[in-house]
Amino acid sequence: MACIGRFAPSPTGELHLGNLRTALASWLSVRAAGGRWLIRMEDVDTARCRSTLGEAQLRDLAALGLESDGPVLWQSRRKGAYQAALQRLFGAGLLYPCICTRKDLAGMASAPHGEDGLRPYPGTCRHRPLPFLRPDALRFRVPEGSVAWEDLLLGPQQDDPAALTGDPLLHRRDGCYAYHLAVVVDDGGQGVTEIVRGQDLRGVTATQARLQEALGLPRPAYGHLGLVTAPDGSRLGKRDGALGLALLAHRGVDAARVLGWLGWSLGCLERPERAGLEELLPGFSWAKVPSGPVAVPASWM
Ligand code: GLU
């Protein structure tokens, strides 16, 4: 089966080094397998996303030589596909309306926090006899049981989606389709076979696998990369959040140096020296990618 990978940023801001590292790892993995690499703009949340930010992200990716092998898919134009998926889940009895407000959810202090700060939905509306209204907040009734998968980077993984995310929201009361639905429908629709993303999303994989099963979609391979941190290993704060190509160029670090550093951080080079994609590709192998976080050079801060 041909390998199809994708990079799927949300156009809510500038791409930072962590995003660029994810994009590069995904591109290298797909190219090493002779496959196709796609870019998808995850702009379902129209209140937070801007097409101008998406265009700027595409320019930054192109500055590193990372271009989609086919048209860039914008999720804001895919509402029909998401609605059809909801219909299918409704038909299978796997959707239920939820009337919990943000305040209700915040007040559920006893709910344990899932990894990465996610708070699993405790299932309050699961057993409430509620009518389906329009527009409704709709949740996926996640089937019981844990999900096992082999992560390209982390090896064997096993998670219980009920414990990590609970029943995720698939449609919001404001009419927006939610991330879990859009990501699963589009990965399936685009024939994606390999997903490389940050470890902050590892905890949602089991939930998305359950949704794939419910929609009759195949499960892609997953690789979850360590995050890019500040030089002292702490999380890059909001203030450093724009540590992207523009700020680095302003500090005298050009695209070839960024690419060389990213490639080195993925195990493709012996030293973090300037490089082009063609110099990184022969050195790429998942066996050489470090599984932990990687710190930005202090001189770039
Ligand atoms: N759009 C998501 C983000 O930017 C990534 C989704 C994914 O890779 O599954 O965080």
Image: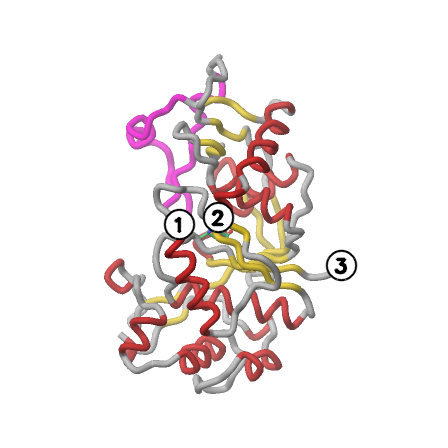
- Image location of residue 287, percent across then percent down: 60, 72
- Image location of residue 288, percent across then percent down: 56, 75
* Span colored in magenta: 99-127
Please tell me which residue is depicted at 57% across the width and 44% down the height of the picture: 184
Circle 1: element type: helix
> Spatial distance from mark 1 to mark 2, Cα to Cα?
7 Å
Examine the rendered structure and indicate whether residue 105 appears above or below residue 51.
above
Please tell me which residue is depicted at 60% across the width and 36% down the height of the picture: 145
Mark 1 touching mark 2, by CB under 8 A? yes
Of residue 94 and residue 121, the one placed in the foreground of this image is: 94
Q: Which residue is mark 1?
A: 116
Circle 2: element type: helix
Q: Which residue is mark 3?
A: 1
| Residue at the left extreme, as displayed | 239
Image quadrant in which the C terminus is located: bottom left
Image-quadrant location for residue 94: top right
Mark 1 residue CB less than 8 A from any atom of ligand 1: no
> Spatial distance from mark 2 to mark 3, Cα to Cα?
27 Å
The label shown at residue 42 is none
Q: Which residue is mark 2?
A: 203
**Magenta: predominant secondary structure element?**
loop
Mark 2 belongs to which amino acid? Gly
> Spatial distance from mark 1 to mark 3, Cα to Cα?
33 Å
- Image location of residue 35, percent across then percent down: 68, 66
User: Is 283 included in the stretch rendered in magenta?
Assistant: no
Circle 3: element type: loop
Judged left or right of residue 198, residue 286 is right
Question: Which of the two discs, 1 and 2, labels the residue nearer the N terminus?
Answer: 1
